[in-house]
Image: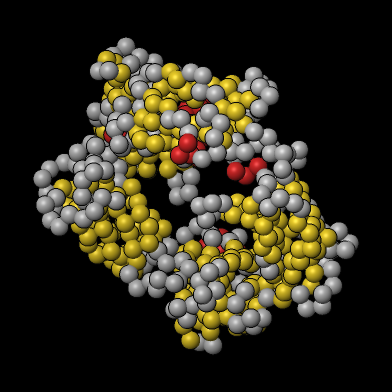
C-alpha cells in the first residue's frame, strides 16, 4: 500500500518542483503533437490553480515529462505537444482525493497527433487523522512509523490511500488526504527486531497488539479525527541468540562469512535482517535484541561460491538461545553457454553480456525455492554453483531477453532439469531470444462505450510455453481510458489475448478472448468485443 502511494507522491512532487508556467510549453515544434484538455472540479465547481501533469510510462519506469498545466478560474486545463507513447495523466493536489475511482489517474496511449478532450477530474477533500505516540511513561516517541489499515472504505471501490507517515519531534503525527471509510491506526513496524537498544512493539490505537481489539476510526469527507493517540510498550524482554558456522563436511569453523536471520510472522510470511556482520575467527555469530518468536539463521554465500547454507531454525521464548549450528554444504552446479538466437545485431549481443542469468531450483517436495545468479562471460559462458537439489530452470534479467529453451546433450528440457545433491552439470545450452514484437489493441463493449466506473484489464499469454519454464510470458496489462492497450517486448509466437470487464467491484465479470500471431519487429493489431450478456463469472 505504501510503496505505490509513495511513488505517486514522488511523481507529484517532481511536477511541483518546477515553477509552472503554461506558456513554458511554447517554442519551436518540428511537428504537432497530441493535446489533453479537461476540467477539474470540487463539488461540481471549477477548481482554480490545480496542477495536472503527465507521467511517461516506459518499460520499467515512470518519469515526469515536464508537461503540465494549471487550471484556470473555471477549472479548465490544456496540455499540448504530447509525443507518441504511454502516459499517465494525474492531478497533484495534496489534501484532495478523487471523488470516485474513475477520477483517479488516467492512462492513455498516444500514437498520433490527436485531441484528447473532456478528460475531467472530480476531487473531494480528504479527511485527517492526527494524534500522539508516547511510551508508557508518557514520553513522546520521535520518528515512529504510522500507517492505516482499512476496515471498510466508504464506497467499496476506492484504491487510493494516503502515504504512511512518521511522528515529529513532539511525537505527533498527521495523516491527511484520507478517503472516507473506517480504519485502524497502527504505530511501529514488525521489522524492528534485532535493532540496538530494544525497540517497541507494533501496536494499534489506543494500545493493543491485536487488530481485532483496536478502536476503529471513521472518516468522512473533510472530517478531522483528533486525539487518536497510541501508547507503545517498550520491548523489555529481548533476548540474544548465539551459535557457530561450520563446514558441514569437515566440522571446521568458518570465519569471516556474512550471516543473517529470518523471523516468521503469524500470517506465515517472513522478514529478514542482515546487518553485514561476519563470523569471527572461531566461526561464531550472535544476534541481539530478539523478541520472543520463531526464527531461522543462515549464511550469505558470496557470489560464485560452490557452497550453500543450511537453515538453522530456533525459537525464542523467555531466555537467550545458545548452541546454534549453521552448516555450509557443498552444493550442485550448472555450467554451459548462452546462445542468442535470431539476430546478428552486435548491439544486442552487447546488451546480453550486461545481463545476468538466473538459476531457480525448486525442491522436489515444493517446500523451498532458491535462486542464484551468474554473470555472462564475453564468450557467452556461465557457471552457477551452490545449488540445492531439485528442479532447475533458468531465466534472464536483461530487458526483452527471454530463455526460450534449455538443451542438455542436445535434448530440450521443457520441464526443467532434475538436479541431484552436489551434482555438477556441464555442457548446457541456454537459448535466448531478444523480443521485439508488440500487440496494439482495443477493447469494446457490444452495448456501446466502456462506462467510466467500470473495470477492464487484458491478459496476454504466449501459447506453447511450459508452465514450469522460468521465463514463460503471462502477464496482465492496463487498458487506457478509451479501452486501448499496447504490449511490447514480445517474443515471436501465438498469443491468447483475454479482456475481462466488470461494471464495478460487485458485478460478475464477462470476458472476450482472441488469438494473435506476433513476429519480431512488427506490431500486431487486435480488437476484442465483450458480450456483456454472455456467461458472466465471479468478480475478480
> Can residue 121 be seen at all in this image of the molecule?
yes
Identify the residue at the far right of this view: 281
Q: Residue at x 26, y 32 (%)?
A: 115
- The residue nearer to you, when weighing 228 against 539, is 228
For residue 70, what is the image quadrant? Answer: top left
Rendering coords of residue 454 (x, y %) = 23, 41
- The residue nearer to you, when weighing 186 against 519, is 186
Rendering coords of residue 482 (x, y %) = 24, 41
- The residue nearer to you, when weighing 52 against 420, is 420
Q: Residue at x 63, y 73 (%)?
A: 387
The answer to whether residue 103 is above or below residue 41 is below
Rendering coords of residue 473 (x, y %) = 40, 64
Question: Tell me, what colour scheme is on the image?
Answer: secondary structure
The answer to whether residue 403 is above or below residue 206 is below
Rendering coords of residue 218 (x, y %) = 39, 26
Q: Residue at x 52, y 55 (%)?
A: 268
Instruction: Please give left or right for residue 41 compared with residue 309 in the image.
Output: left
- The residue nearer to you, when weighing 356 against 129, is 129
Identify the residue at the far top of this view: 73
> Can residue 18 be seen at all in this image of the molecule?
no
For residue 220, what is the image quadrant? Answer: top left
Instruction: Please give left or right for residue 137 compared with residue 538 in the image.
Output: right
Please state the total of marks drawn on the protein image. Answer: 0
Q: Residue at x 28, y 22 (%)?
A: 39
Amino acid at each position: 500500500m505504501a510503496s505505490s502511494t509513495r511513488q505517486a507522491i514522488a511523481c507529484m512532487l517532481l511536477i511541483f518542483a518546477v515553477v509552472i508556467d503554461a506558456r513554458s510549453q511554447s517554442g519551436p515544434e518540428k511537428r504537432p503533437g497530441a493535446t489533453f484538455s479537461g476540467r477539474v472540479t470540487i463539488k461540481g465547481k471549477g477548481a482554480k490553480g490545480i496542477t495536472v501533469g503527465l507521467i511517461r510510462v516506459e518499460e520499467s519506469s515512470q518519469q515526469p515529462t515536464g508537461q503540465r498545466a494549471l487550471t484556470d478560474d473555471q477549472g479548465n486545463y490544456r496540455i499540448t505537444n504530447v509525443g507518441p507513447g504511454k502516459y499517465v495523466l494525474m492531478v497533484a493536489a495534496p489534501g484532495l482525493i478523487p471523488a470516485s475511482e474513475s477520477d483517479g489517474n488516467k492512462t492513455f496511449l498516444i500514437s498520433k497527433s490527436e485531441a484528447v478532450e473532456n478528460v475531467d477530474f472530480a476531487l473531494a477533500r480528504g479527511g485527517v487523522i492526527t494524534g500522539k505516540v508516547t511510551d508508557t511513561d508518557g514520553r513522546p516517541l520521535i520518528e515512529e512509523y504510522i500507517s492505516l489499515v482499512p476496515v471498510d472504505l466508504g464506497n467499496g471501490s476506492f484504491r487510493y490511500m494516503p502515504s504512511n507517515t512518521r511522528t515529529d519531534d513532539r511525537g505527533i503525527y498527521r495523516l491527511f488526504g484520507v478517503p472516507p471509510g473506517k480504519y485502524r491506526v497502527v504505530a511501529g513496524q514488525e521489522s524492528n527486531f534485532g535493532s540496538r537498544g530494544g525497540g517497541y512493539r507494533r501496536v494499534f490505537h489506543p494500545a493493543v497488539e491485536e487488530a481485532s481489539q483496536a478502536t476503529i476510526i471513521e472518516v468522512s469527507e473533510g472530517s478531522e479525527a483528533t486525539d487518536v493517540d497510541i501508547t507503545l510498550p517498550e520491548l523489555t524482554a529481548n533476548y540474544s541468540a548465539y551459535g557457530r558456522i561450520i563446514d558441514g563436511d569437515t566440522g571446521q569453523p568458518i570465519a569471516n562469512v556474512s550471516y543473517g536471520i529470518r523471523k516468521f510472522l503469524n500470517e506465515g510470511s517472513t522478514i529478514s535482517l542482515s546487518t553485514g556482520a561476519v563470523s569471527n575467527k572461531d566461526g561464531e555469530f550472535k544476534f541481539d535484541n530478539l523478541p520472543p518468536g520463531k526464527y531461522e539463521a543462515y549464511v550469505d554465500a558470496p557470489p560464485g561460491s560452490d557452497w550453500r547454507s543450511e537453515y538453522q531454525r530456533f525459537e525464542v521464548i523467555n531466555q537467550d538461545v545458545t548452541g546454534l549450528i549453521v552448516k555450509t554444504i557443498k552444493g550442485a552446479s550448472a555450467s554451459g553457454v548462452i546462445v542468442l538466437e535470431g539476430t546478428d545485431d552486435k548491439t544486442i549481443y552487447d546488451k546480453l553480456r550486461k545481463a545476468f542469468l538466473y538459476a531457480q531450483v525448486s525442491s522436489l517436495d515444493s517446500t523451498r525455492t532458491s535462486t542464484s545468479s551468474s554473470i555472462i562471460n564475453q564468450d557467452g559462458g556461465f557457471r552457477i554453483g551452490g545449488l540445492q537439489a531439485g528442479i532447475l530452470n533458468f531465466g534472464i534479467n536483461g530487458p526483452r531477453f527471454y530463455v526460450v529453451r534449455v538443451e542438455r546433450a542436445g535434448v530440450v528440457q521443457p520441464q526443467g532439469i532434475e538436479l541431484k545433491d552436489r551434482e555438477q552439470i556441464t555442457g548446457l545450452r541456454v537459448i535466448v531470444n531478444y523480443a521485439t514484437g508488440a500487440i496494439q489493441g482495443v477493447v469494446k463493449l457490444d452495448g456501446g462505450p466502456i462506462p467510466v466506473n467500470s473495470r477492464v484489464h487484458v491478459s496476454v499469454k504466449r501459447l506453447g510455453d511450459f508452465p514450469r519454464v522460468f521465463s514463460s510470458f503471462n502477464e496482465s496489462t492496463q487498458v487506457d481510458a478509451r479501452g486501448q492497450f499496447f504490449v511490447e517486448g514480445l517474443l515471436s509466437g501465438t498469443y491468447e489475448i483475454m479482456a475481462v470487464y466488470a461494471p464495478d467491484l460487485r458485478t460478475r465479470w464477462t470476458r472476450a478472448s482472441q488469438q494473435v500471431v506476433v513476429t519480431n519487429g512488427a506490431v500486431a493489431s487486435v480488437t476484442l468485443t465483450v458480450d456483456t450478456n454472455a456467461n458472466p463469472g465471479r468478480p475478480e
